[in-house]
Image (tube, grey):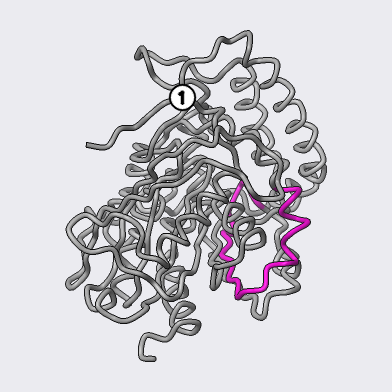
Amino acid sequence: MSVRPTTPHQHEGARMPHTRRLLSACLAALVAVWAAAAHADGARAASTPGDRAQAPTAAPAGPAVLPEGVVDLPVEFTVDNVNRTRGQCSSDGEEYTVRGHLTAPAAVLERDDPAVMLLVHGTNTGEWIWRLDVQGRNFAHELAARGHASVTVDRLGYGSSDIPDGFATCSGAHSDIAHQVVERLREGDYTADGGDATAFGTVFMGGHSSGALVAETASASFGGIDGLFLTGWAAVGITGDTNRRFLTAYETCLEGGLPHSEPGDPEGYVRFDATLEDFVDGGLGPSADPAVVAAVEERWGPNPCGVMVSEPMAILYDLDLVDEIDVPVHLVFGSLDVLRQGVEGYPGLFTSSPEVTETTLEDAGHFVTVDEGSERVYDTAAAWMERHAPTDS
């Protein structure tokens, strides 16, 4: 049986001075990154989602069904919580287990050196953003139905993965961990429940929201990734809605995180979206399937303070590194994304990439992998993988 460890409790008086210094530095970086938020808000005013009650009244989709011929295997990766990126943030250096799923056509796993896409979620979601239990809105299922393999994981401090103290890890450490998972996938050095661990010859990385920040930092810092498929993300165009959410969560982290009702629960966790309404309206456009809305509402959860408050500095580092990324990049934006607007110039920052392409969903918000029009994302992802790692070769 595996154990989900937490770090030993630290005396509040010993921890908080360091925490305050960390948060103060991150807040200064936040101000620098988000100086243009008011301008971006003006740009998005015409496209702000309307009342959700105006959404279509068609019957909602049912639960997700695994496509025929596709396997869905629980997987585990042993990783070190270290930060060897250029982004300066602290982690505890301990060993942990990151858990997730390998979803692929069975025939793909029988090939020599097949291709896979590691999918990394953002700060306020989890593995579920790629595996929502709604038919036609499960990215991993839909990619497999189109002939391609993916691995989804809960990042350290989320969901099924180990849950340390929320201040024990940070954005740079999550990029390092993603790099370690890429290495394990290439070597076949992980545990796959119900089957042998496949060694993959080609490994792409997909990232949603700040999971794309993790992916960009991992690619620029370590290499070893064959391409980036990035959704709901740009290191520019951050809006006042993002600012408001972050500052509220920042204050909570400054006080040590959310209170816990259960003794022994790990400390240092916070919700990026302070209310369920913010979570849903910040994620989905007004035309989202009611089944998607209901499923997303159930996924409103806490996030590690150390990850969230280190992201402003990580964004500054990312803006300095993005022109070093030398692999194909595809970006997916939602026109109704209240957290990112004015992103048109972002693809042009990938000056070393041999190919930069993009897709914009006109009726989608931030959660483009599950929102209205996400079928285009699945089709695009499959075609993009096929182009860069043909299955008939």
Image height of 12 relative to 215, above or below: above
The residue that label 1 is drawn on is 7
Q: Is residue 191 left or right of residue 272?
A: left
Q: Is residue 305 above or below residue 127?
A: above
339 inside magenta stretch? yes
Q: Residue at 74%, 50% (x, y): give it.
A: 317
Q: What span is in magenta?
A: 315-340
Judge left or right: residue 195 versus residue 280. Answer: left
Of the 4 image quadrants, the one containing the C terminus is: bottom left
The quadrant in which residue 197 appears is bottom left
Residue positioned 34% across, 54% down in the render: 131
102 falls in the magenta region? no
Residue situated in front as seen by the camera: 237 or 393? 393
Residue 41 rendering spot, x and y as whole percentages: 73, 46
User: Which residue is drawn at the image coordinates 69% and 20% (left, top)?
Assistant: 18
Which structural element holds mark 1? loop
The quadrant of the image that shows the N terminus is: top left
The amino acid type of the residue labelled 1 equals Thr
Near mark 1 (Cα within 10 A), the count class, few <14, some 14-19 or many ≥20, is some
Give me the residue at 75% from left, 70% from top.
348
